[in-house]
């Protein structure tokens, strides 16, 4: 029996045969990136249900010297969640770790497992009249674990920061298969080394994130957007400074798009109307989030 075969058999005993995928038809969706640009192979796709099962699988991988590739929603565009072509690695899917463990409206926190879809976190926050500020194009299928592993930014990073700034605590399985419990919701915490920030953005190389305490914010009363045509990126920087002075913390988003990007959208979505009478080298999309009213936010745009 080869080392990978013994590893796969041990994984079946640890988490159940139904959650150790080896059939090519079953493993195929896990072995290529979202753009179908990177194609890999794996001895198995492992689908644990909880942190303890993740820890057990990591210990087995260490014992059998099998490399693990953690994977969330598999929405990445750079192949970071795709195994190599050797077939010797195993994909560790966190999709079944999909529980919202707690929501604390007083502390403005939500504790979620790594496999929870970003849009589901947003929805749970909205049910509590709160905002989970991380928002990006893949929010309907990407997962919190992947967002943290890549330190995702999203459209509201200007106001709320990257995923790292939205995270207060983590639960992580270390490369030795030990569980590090750092699920704290403290905002003022100076107790020793901040291991949390090491794990965030490390893409699973230092440990596998299995759960996180994330920050919530008061839900804005209104959001408004506007488009502005500009001649250059330098003009966009001047415009950003002007917008920040005028709107202050109400400025949630500021996205710069070149004329090439706008034409690309028009090529693939010809039913959409071009927003200006003529083409311009640069277009900026602004978003304001206002705690008073839509009318108040629109008045800021008109100043």
Image (cartoon, helix red, strand yellow):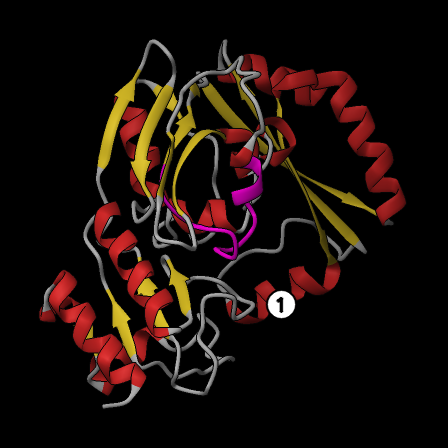
Height in image: 131 above or below 81?
above
Q: Is residue 239 left or right of residue 115?
A: right
Please indicate, yes or no, whether residue 154 appears anywhere in the rendered image: no
Q: For this rendering, which residue is in front, 59 or 15?
A: 59
Quadrant of residue 262 in the image? bottom right
243 relative to 177 in the view: left or right: right
User: Which residue is rendered at x = 32% and y = 47% of the image?
Assistant: 117
120 or 288: nearer the viewer: 120
Residue 92 in the image: state x and y as whole percent: 33, 64
Query: In this picture, which residue range is highlighted in magenta?
Result: 197-211
Quadrant housing the C terminus: top right
Residue in the image at 31% along x and 75% along y: 29
Asked whether 202 falls inside the magenta stretch, the response is yes
**For the N terminus, which image quadrant?**
bottom left
Q: Secondary structure at mark 1?
A: helix
Considering every residue shown, the one lying at the far bottom of the view is 1
Question: Is residue 67 rendered magenta in the image?
Answer: no
In the picture of the structure, the residue carrying the numbered disc 1 is: 264
Residue 58 on image: x %, y %: 33, 59
Location of residue 213 (image quadrant): top left
Depicted 93 relative to depicted 90: above or below:
above
Residue 172 at x, y = what percent? Answer: 39, 43
- Left or right, residue 220 beside residue 25: right
User: Which of the 4 image quarters holds residue 228?
Assistant: top right
* Residue at x-position 54% and y-position 46%: 152
Q: Position of residue 229 (x, y in %)?
A: 76, 45
């Amino acid at each position: 029996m080869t080392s990978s075969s013994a590893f796969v058999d041990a994984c079946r005993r640890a988490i159940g045969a139904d959650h150790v995928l080896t059939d090519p038809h079953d493993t195929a969706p896990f072995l290529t990136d979202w753009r179908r640009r990177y194609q890999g192979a794996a001895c198995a796709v492992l689908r644990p249900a909880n942190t303890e099962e993740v820890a057990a699988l990591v210990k087995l991988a260490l014992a059998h010297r099998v490399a693990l590739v953690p994977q969330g929603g598999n929405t990445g565009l750079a192949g970071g969640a795709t195994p190599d072509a050797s077939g010797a690695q195993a994909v560790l899917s966190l999709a079944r770790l999909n529980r919202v463990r707690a929501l604390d409206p007083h502390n403005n926190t939500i504790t979620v497992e790594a496999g929870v879809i970003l849009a589901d976190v947003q929805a749970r926050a909205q049910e509590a009249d709160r905002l989970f500020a991380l928002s990006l194009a893949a929010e309907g299928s990407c997962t919190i674990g992947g967002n943290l592993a890549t330190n995702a930014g999203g459209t509201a990073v200007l106001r709320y920061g990257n995923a790292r700034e939205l995270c207060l605590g983590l639960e992580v399985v270390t490369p030795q298969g030990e569980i590090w419990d750092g699920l704290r919701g403290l905002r003022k915490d100076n107790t020793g080394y901040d291991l949390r920030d090491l794990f965030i953005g490390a893409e699973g190389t230092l440990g596998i994130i299995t759960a996180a305490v994330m920050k919530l914010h008061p839900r804005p009363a209104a959001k408004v957007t506007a488009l502005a045509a500009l001649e250059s990126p330098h003009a966009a920087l001047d415009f950003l400074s002007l917008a920040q002075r005028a709107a202050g913390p109400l400025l949630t988003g500021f996205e710069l798009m070149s004329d090439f990007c706008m034409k690309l959208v028009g090529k693939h979505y010809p039913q959409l109307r071009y927003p200006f009478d003529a083409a311009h080298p640069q277009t900026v999309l602004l978003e304001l989030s206002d705690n008073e009213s839509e009318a108040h936010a629109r008045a800021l745009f008109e100043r």
